[in-house]
Image (tube, rainbow, N blue to C red):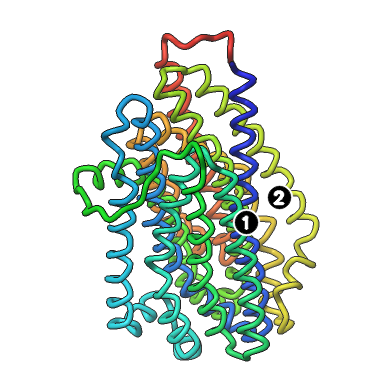
């Protein structure tokens, strides 16, 4: 039994890693293309607008992870309760996305000033932001769809959808930026179109013989929407924390080093998204198996999937840290196409410090997703709040004030290490509470 769970969890983990790695690969290539077409100011602009992208992702993940977890917990014992949940969430996300488009068009300039745009970056950010706003409903629907399809037993399709999105974004980026000479606007158009292609590929799930999902027009039931949102709250704050931290980083770095420091952080933050993407891949690979086994009261199976997740996570973190420490200068040089000396100094000194966090980030994301999988949303929410807000924001400000720009970089590993201690306590306490699981399978 345990061997089957290990094989199934491994199957889910590696398909999710490739899917999320594909998405993060696009982000890196997009960053490179922007640096070529718009230089240091382009990188700064990209980093200023990035929190909006995180906001869309966060809402999509909240509804997708929470809804799909609710789906997994009930599809065996109470399938009638969640039959319409997927359709309700899609309807809600589409309507909410349209509202966001209208609001972002009405208040473009105030929002950009709030995000840290100045007179140098505002002209580039204005049109980029408005085009990107159109992606809101598609991004949210995408995250809901892929999470439900994964938990409906078809992770291979979600991987194919993600890779299709990535490849199309890279091609569209190149064509629109360089061939049609649209610059950063071309990058924004590509980012708005690509999620729709993900949804097109995901629609082939209707041909999956074992599927239980159906899509039809369904008015949202607020009782089930709130239950899904409650389970997905940790994922929401976890993803949104990236945007909030970028926002705070931008303001602190603007005071310490100006636009070159923000551009350097843009490079570091986009590389960090690769680490986070792989961590999400592992965590979201463990989650459906852990949820299912927990729903069947097979606690040994839950722990088996978690242990495999820990092993893969630590392997990825170790490889990432070694590579970025040894090759930090050539990595930065790839994105520093304008050969800015200030950007190079800030980024090369920052990479080894910042990416000490790789070990802790991967563990924290996995532990949060584990708490969601076993229906402990409060603990998952607490970890999200601690790592994204309560510890991180003061750490950025205090470390930046005391130690300058290198202190800002160090605030992230300090935060993640503290959260790992708290998360380890939550997980071990949860496991000790399961008195009746079979120890021979662990």
Q: Secondary structure at mark 2?
A: helix
Q: Is residue 135 left or right of residue 77?
A: right
Look at 34% across and 56% down and name the residue there.
90
Q: Position of residue 12 (x, y in %)?
A: 59, 38
Look at 46% across and 40% down and name the residue there.
211
Q: Position of residue 267 (x, y in %)?
A: 63, 68
Look at 80% across and 55% down and name the residue there.
326
Q: Is residue 310 left or right of residue 202?
A: right
Task: Indicate which disc, 2 or 1, sits on the residue closer to the N terminus.
Answer: 1
* Spatial CA span between label 2 and label 1: 9 Å
* Cβ atoms at labels 2 and 1 below 8 Å apart: yes
Q: Secondary structure at mark 1?
A: helix
Pick the residue in front: 65 or 421: 65
Q: Position of residue 8 (x, y in %)?
A: 60, 30
Q: Position of residue 66 (x, y in %)?
A: 36, 43
Q: Quadrant of the N terminus?
A: top right
Q: Is residue 211 left or right of residue 175?
A: left
Q: Which residue is mark 1?
A: 274
Dot 2: few (<14), some (14–19), or many (≥20) neighbours within 10 Å?
some
Q: Quadrant of the C terminus?
A: top right
Q: Is residue 133 left or right of residue 300?
A: left
Q: Which residue is mark 2?
A: 320
Q: Nearer the viewer, mark 2 or mark 1?
A: 1
Pick the residue in front: 137 or 342: 137
Look at 56% across and 66% down and name the residue there.
404
């Amino acid at each position: 039994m345990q061997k089957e769970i290990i094989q199934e969890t491994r199957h889910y983990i590696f398909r999710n890693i490739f899917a999320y790695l594909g998405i993060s690969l696009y982000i890196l290539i997009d960053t490179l293309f922007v640096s070529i077409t718009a230089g240091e100011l382009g990188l700064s602009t990209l980093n200023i607008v990035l929190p909006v992208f995180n906001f869309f992702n966060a809402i999509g993940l909240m509804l997708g992870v929470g809804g799909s977890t609710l789906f997994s917990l009930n599809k065996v014992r109470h399938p009638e309760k969640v039959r319409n949940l997927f359709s309700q969430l899609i309807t809600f996300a589409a309507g909410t996305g349209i509202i966001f488009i209208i609001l972002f068009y009405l208040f473009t300039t105030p929002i950009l000033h709030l995000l840290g745009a100045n007179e140098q970056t505002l002209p580039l950010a204005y049109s980029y932001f408005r085009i990107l706003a159109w992606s809101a409903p598609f991004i949210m629907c995408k995250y809901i769809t892929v999470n439900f399809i994964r938990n409906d037993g078809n992770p291979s399709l979600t991987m194919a959808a993600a890779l299709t999105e990535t490849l199309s974004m890279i091609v569209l980026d190149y064509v629109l930026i360089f061939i049609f000479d649209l610059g950063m606007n071309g990058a924004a158009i590509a980012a708005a179109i690509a999620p729709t292609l993900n949804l097109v590929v995901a629609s082939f799930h209707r041909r999956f013989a074992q599927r239980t999902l159906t899509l039809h027009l369904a008015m949202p039931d607020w009782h089930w929407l709130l239950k899904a949102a409650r389970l997905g709250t940790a994922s929401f704050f976890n993803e949104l924390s990236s945007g909030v931290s970028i926002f705070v980083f931008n303001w602190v770095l603007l005071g310490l080093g100006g636009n070159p420091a923000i551009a350097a952080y843009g490079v570091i933050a986009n590389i960090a998204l690769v680490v986070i993407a792989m961590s999400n891949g592992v965590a979201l690979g463990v989650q459906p198996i852990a949820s299912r086994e927990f729903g069947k009261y097979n606690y040994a199976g839950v722990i088996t999937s978690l242990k495999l997740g820990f092993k893969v996570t630590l392997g990825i973190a170790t490889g990432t840290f070694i590579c970025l420490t040894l090759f930090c200068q050539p990595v930065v040089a790839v994105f520093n196409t304008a050969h800015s000396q200030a950007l190079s100094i800030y980024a090369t000194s920052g990479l080894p410090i910042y990416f000490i966090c790789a070990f802790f980030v991967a563990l924290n994301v996995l532990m949060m997703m584990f708490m969601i999988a076993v229906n402990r949303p409060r603990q998952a929410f607490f970890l999200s709040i601690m790592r994204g807000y309560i510890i991180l924001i003061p750490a950025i400000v205090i470390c930046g004030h005391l130690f300058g720009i290198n202190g800002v970089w160090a605030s992230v590993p300090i935060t993640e290490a503290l959260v790992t201690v708290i998360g380890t306590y939550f997980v071990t306490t949860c496991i000790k509470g399961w008195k009746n699981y079979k120890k021979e399978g662990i």
